[in-house]
Amino acid sequence: MKCIISGGSGFIGRKLVDSLLKDDHYVSVWSRNPGEETRSAVGSFYWDTVGGEPAEESLNDFDAVIHLAGEPVAQRWSDEVKKRIRDTRVLGTRHLVSALGKVRHRPSILVCASAVGYYGDRGEEILTEQSGQGRGFLADVCREWEQEADGAAVLGMRVVKIRISVVLGKDGGALKQMLPPFRAGVGGKLGSGKQWMPWIHVNDLVGLLRFALEHEIAGVFNGASPEPVTNAKFTEAMSGVLHRPAIFPVPGLALKLLFGEMAQVMLSSERVLPKAAEAAGFKFTFPEIRAALRDVVG
């Protein structure tokens, strides 16, 4: 299979590229700095997702497109940051679909990232792919993002949208910021710790992205473990795996002072289950939080 990936140099993208190369697929990536791609087996094309459409030659004769690119959400939000978060996702996907509409030999598959932020803060409610949109900035961004991706279905492409949760991996993702305080023995729950925290091991996310490429599925799939945990349970599991105390909770007010509006994302509760992925036959390697953390940091 010939695949091209946006965000292919990021934490998730690099893992996906390596997995595809291992099975002898042909892989190219888009980048704003294509000359920095050092993997000799990987093709590289220039694309600034906000600046305009990718070049036709970067899409022609490919079998599949995996669209992962987007401004990081985990930073203090300003009006400018929020604009980049939205534009890199919504405008970027619009530009991609527009380019796909002009390609003579069009890919047949678009796998597009989305996020569990679609559901918003929902307390104890169990959330599946059938649940409606929540409220808030990220929920609105995710809705627009997915709507833009659906434009590829009008072109006759099979479209899969993966709503990604907190991704756990050894060299990036959420743990890059979480690990230092936990290893220093000053970790703790966020706010009350009662909020539900959907998560997924990076290997399972890569597996789900590949499952979407290799099986005749379409629509929305939650990229989350079948066993979500509360933030307090996650903290307890991290403490146990690292053999470090975690007795320093971070009050919600402190989070708001540090992160501003983005703190609400850290305190929101999303009890997300991957019902569609399981119904399609996808099997998780790391469904349980302690086993996932032991693999990543133990």
Image (cartoon, grey):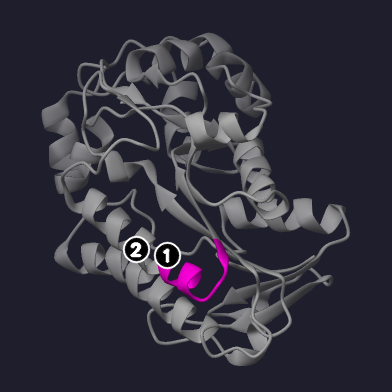
| Magenta extent | 149-158
* Percent coordinates x, y for residue 143 in the rendering: 29, 56
Q: Is residue 46 above or below residue 37?
A: below
Q: Is residue 150 magenta?
A: yes
Secondary structure, magenta segment, majority class: helix
Quadrant where the C terminus sits is top right
Q: Is any part of residue 103 visible from this angle? A: yes
Q: Which mark is residue 150?
A: 1
Circle 2: residue type:
Gln
Residues at badges 2 and 1 in contact (C-beta under 8 Å)?
Answer: yes
* Percent coordinates x, y for residue 167 in the rendering: 51, 38
Nearer to me, 259 or 291: 291
* Percent coordinates x, y for residue 138 in the rendering: 25, 51
Q: Which residue in the structure is indicated by mark 2? A: 147
Nearer to me, 195 or 207: 207
Give the residue displayed 27% in from the left and 24% down from the top: 190
Circle 1: residue type:
Asp
Near mark 1 (Cα within 10 A), the count class, few <14, some 14-19 or many ≥20, is many
Nearer to me, 185 or 158: 158
